[in-house]
Amino acid sequence: MDTDFTILAIETSCDETAAAVIRGGRTIISNVVASQIDEHRRYGGIVPEVASRQHILTINAVLHDALRPLPGGWNDIHAVAATYGPGLAGALMTGLNVAKAIAWIRELPFIGVNHIEAHIYANWLLTDAQPDAPEPQFPVVALVVSGGHTLLALLEGHGRYRMLGQTRDDAAGEAFDKVARLLGLGFPGGPAIQKAAENAPGGVTLPRAWLRDSYDFSFSGLKTAVLHQIREYRAREAALQPGAGKGAGKRGAPATTDATPLPPAIVARLARAFQESVVDVLVTKTVEAARAFGATEVLLAGGVAANLRLREELHRRSPVPVRVPPIALCTDNAAMIGAAAFYRFDAGKQDGWDLDVQPNLPLQAG
Ligand code: KG4
Ligand code: ZN
């Protein structure tokens, strides 16, 4: 297809309001992301209603910024794309309807994009650091790890996926966020745990859910294991308090409660043990899949791909080259939506005005 083909892409599936202009599927003309993280931080997590309202308030300014580098403005756009799932229904609705409205008014093709597929396509985007990077060659194995998803997929061609495994409970990013909360670290939890784990002493090993003979993942048991470690620590501390064992409990609150901050050394040690466990399972299964399916490359995708230990271990243990987008393209953005849209359109696919949001859209061929 024409390498000048220019797509305006919109992403509003969660807490980022984003728009980008992508040329030829790989060149980023603009990539604007307005994060709502400060709006959600005070609640300790993402509040869907707040997200929906923020998207409506922000989308026009974000679009304006995304179009700014185009000499011909709207006239330089050849197609419009938006995420239609998976994600928060109310949040998805804003981006999808804005994209449909623009495409309809300007009589342009409209392309609906699967958000998980788009995370994988972030690996097709060219960056300043590697402006001549060749396209990934199929078959590739992709590990998608984000706040909402954890899955391993085999890509045999554009739009041809085979799901190898996925999480049976929490997504990897969700586990990072929940464990960060248990440890009294901030939101979002991934970066907070990574930071706390830096230079932390070893000494604690947490379990790994291998789920033998399966590429599936499970992280909820690990979260419970962290909780047990915290409870054991608090029980030990309580037993060391003066008066412990002499009916101390009857005199009121125990000396350390769940509200008492944990000492930084304990937080660091548990953060490290948790991170090592998650990384070990993710890397082991990805490397096994790459071998089993003869992948030419491993592609990393999603917000947790920002994790430095994950990158390091995957590079160290993978039998084939590992491709990881720069951090700004790992977390939610619209550039990846534009890349995925290009290859979808190139394969002769586009969508009608009846395309609705699909909050639980799986990764599937089509
Ligand atoms: O892909 P993303 O931006 O949004 C979703 O579609 O979910 O991923 C966000 C997730 C959050 O759970 C966040 O804690 C996690 O990515 N994350 C990290 C790191 N940076 C972000 N997890 C581990 N280590 C990091 N450095
Ligand atoms: Zn995402």
Image: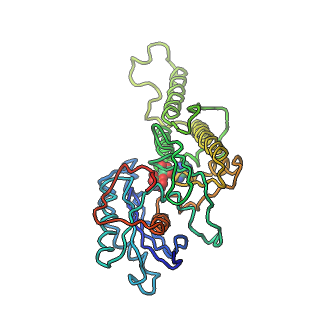
146 shown above or below 60: above
Q: Which image quarter is the C terminus in?
A: bottom left
Q: Position of residue 4 (x, y in %)?
A: 51, 79
Q: In the image, 87: left or right of 260? A: left
> Which of 203/156 is in front?
156
Q: Residue shown at 62%/62% (left/top)? A: 136
Q: Position of residue 277 (x, y in %)?
A: 60, 37
Exactly how many numbered labels are in the figure? 0
**Which residue reaches farthest front?**
348
Q: Position of residue 41 (x, y in %)?
A: 40, 52
> Which of 77/312 is in front?
77
**Which residue reaches farthest bottom?**
71
**Which residue reaches farthest top?**
246
Q: Position of residue 329 (x, y in %)?
A: 53, 62
Q: In the image, 128: left or right of 57? A: right
Whether residue 191 is visible: no
Q: Residue shown at 66%/55% (left/top)? A: 296
> Which of 36/242 is in front?
36
Which corner quadrant of the image does residue 72 belong to?
bottom left
Q: Residue shown at 51%/52% (left/top)? A: 161
154 shown above or below 167: below
Colouring rule applied to residues: rainbow
Whether residue 238 is visible: yes
Q: In the image, 158: left or right of 253? A: right
166 shown above or below 118: above
